[in-house]
Image: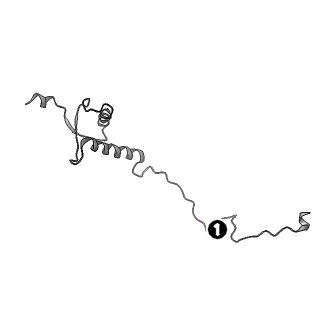
């Protein structure tokens, strides 16, 4: 066996739920190199490069974390519609005009 093979970093699939994997990716973004990462990631999808694949997984993870899957939505209560509420005018009402005797 080759010495390079024995000393190479293990290949693992990127798991967005693994905190260490997210930290390795944050280090990659910070230093722009995988040199500090103790593992080598592989992309499950063959049509995407590794960084694009991880970006998509991270985006989906944080959107799910921020907005959830609908369980934590704020429910607003709507008022039930009634046939007629109290203190409402049902027909147009007019005010009689003031006469000259009332104004003096």
- Residue 27 occupies quadrant: top left
- Residue 84 occupies quadrant: bottom right
* Residue placed most toward the observer, 65 or 34: 34
The residue located at (15%, 28%) in the rendering is 7
Q: Position of residue 73 (x, y in %)?
A: 46, 51
Magenta residues, start to end: 81-86
Residue, disc 1: 84
Q: Colour mode?
A: one colour
Q: Position of residue 17 (x, y in %)?
A: 31, 41
Q: Residues within 10 Å of mark 1 (few under 14, many from 20)?
A: few
Label 1 element class: loop
Q: Which part of the image, by quadrant, shows the N terminus?
A: top left
Q: Position of residue 104 (x, y in %)?
A: 92, 63
- In the displayed structure image, the side of residue 14 where residue 75 appears, left or right: right
Q: Is residue 13 above or below residue 71?
A: above
* Residue placed most toward the observer, 98 or 39: 98
- Residue 78 occupies quadrant: bottom right
Residue farthest along the left direction in this orientation: 1
Residue 98 in the magenta stretch? The answer is no
* Residue placed most toward the observer, 48 or 22: 48
The residue located at (52%, 54%) in the rendering is 76
- In the displayed structure image, the side of residue 62 where residue 33 appears, left or right: left
Q: Position of residue 8 (x, y in %)?
A: 16, 31
Q: Main secondary structure of the magenta part?
A: loop
* Residue placed most toward the observer, 70 or 52: 52
- In the displayed structure image, the side of residue 14 where residue 72 appears, left or right: right
């Amino acid at each position: 066996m080759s010495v390079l093979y024995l000393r190479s970093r293990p290949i693992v699939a990127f798991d967005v739920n693994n905190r260490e994997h997210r930290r390795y990716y944050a280090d990659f973004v910070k230093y722009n190199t995988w040199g500090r990462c103790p593992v080598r990631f592989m992309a499950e999808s063959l049509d995407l490069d590794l960084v694009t694949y991880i970006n998509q997984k991270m985006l989906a993870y944080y959107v799910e974390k921020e907005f959830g899957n609908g369980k934590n939505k704020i429910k607003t209560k709507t008022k039930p519609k009634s046939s007629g509420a109290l203190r409402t005018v049902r027909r147009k009402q007019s005010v009689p005009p003031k006469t000259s005797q009332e104004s003096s």
